[in-house]
Image (cartoon, rainbow, N blue to C red):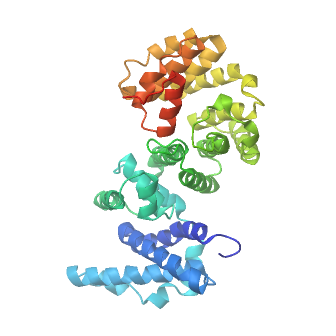
Amino acid sequence: MTSGVPLEELLRELAPQVLGALARRYGQFDAAEDAVQEALLAAAKQWPQVGVPESPRGWLLTVASRRMINDIRSEAARRRREQTVAAATAPEELVAPAADATAADRDDTLTLLFLCCHPALSPASQIAITLRAVGGLTTGQIAGAFLVPEATMAQRISRAKQSIRTAGAAFRMPPAEERPERLRSVLHVLYLIFNEGYTATSGPDLQRPDLTREAIRLTRDLHRLLPDEGEVAGLLALMLLTDARRAARTLADGSLVPLAEQDRSRWDAEAIREGVALITATLSRATIGRYQLQAAIAAVHDEAPSAAATDWPQILVLYELLERIGPNPMVTLNHAVALAMVKGPQAGLTMLDTLDADGRLAGHHRLDAVRAHLLEMAGDHAAYRAAARRTTSLPERRYLEAKAGQNQPVR
């Protein structure tokens, strides 16, 4: 630890700084990323025994630079890259105080995020490479978070780096005309990471707090770098306001507790205050976007002293706006619930009927779950069976089975 910061947190904070310095210097993202990972592993092994060095960033940059130079020299020997070898100075010179001070003045986190969310990558690859390169997570940690073998995740990360190399992506900010679209990709990746942590798509646990914490940390960094971007602030507020309920979402045995039944005294009041302040300030000055509207909806829920006191008419208006600027089937699902709370279950069920032919929700348990909830409001408790069959989350499955009044497992 240094200055009270846990070692793991310190290494995650330093990882993108060191990677950015190397990638900017050599223009070889894939090789730089490998070198930084080796340096992080060395630090994780050595620092607990010998102590954190006076300049942990400089230490990591030294170790990573030496690995990088060795790789460059080996490659040069094989491919006659004399110019690259000649340009590579001695390791001691690469991390001389003057050079390191210059690098320290430049934060490359934003450039790294844009590179990791390059359009040549699939969403799954964007998530994996973002968590490793910017988040500082090891391949094993990422694999564990997504419940896949480490070898599988290693292949995914390797393919992502190969795709970046093949696409000829340079370590620099994208042109101005490409930045809005690329920023949307960055925000979407952070949103996906958070959602997977908040409600795991499969496995025995409903939540994976390590992923939600990492998504919030990365989004907070992005907000620091782009304080005037309304959607960045909106996404951070949405994460804070949503994650504030985490402790109340499950019982001691891991079973799910729906929002209306949660003990609101267990919600994180400080996260709610921060999220509300952030979205209030953002809505007053920025062009409204979908993350801001979702954050505003979350704020209405979080500020209600009880489920019965929830301002559903306000939530309904916000969902109507959200449908206009960012329509998608998941928005419609939640819109239908708000409509049912204001105008009755039949109004919500009628809205759900418009989704039956939407291929994006084919076989998805959430459509069945929402329909079952609205039918329950109308007095019919039997419709939870189909939703329970389709979900791969064990806590959600147990909850839906219980709602259906089943004593036997769904087959």
**Count of numbered tags:** 0
Residue 24 to residue 311: above or below: below
On the rendered image, what quadrant is the C terminus found in?
A: top left
State the quadrant of the N terminus. Answer: bottom right
Percent position of residue 86, x then y: 34, 87
Side of 347 relative to 244 (left or right): left
Residue 293, located in which quarter of the rendered image? top right
Residue 117 visible within the image: no
Instruction: Decide which of 371, 385 is in the foreground and name it.
Output: 385
**Which residue occupies the foreground of this view, 79 or 87?**
79
265 vs 212: above or below: above
Whether residue 170 is visible here, answered yes or no, is yes
| In this picture, residue 151 sits left or right of residue 36 | left
* Residue nearest the observer in this picture, 287 or 392: 392
Q: Residue at x 57, y 51 (%)?
A: 209
Q: Residue furthest front?
A: 407
**Residue 309 on image: x %, y %:** 76, 24
The residue depicted at 52 percent of the width and 69 percent of the height is 15
In the image, 399 versus 51, the foreground residue is: 399
Q: In the image, residue 19 lies at what x, y percent? A: 47, 70
The residue positioned 72% from the left and 42% from the top of the image is: 267
Depicted 202 relative to depicted 7: above or below? above
Residue 62 rendering spot, x and y as whole percentages: 49, 83
Q: Quadrant of residue 67?
A: bottom left
| Left or right, 302 with reference to 132 | right
Q: Quadrant of residue 10?
A: bottom right
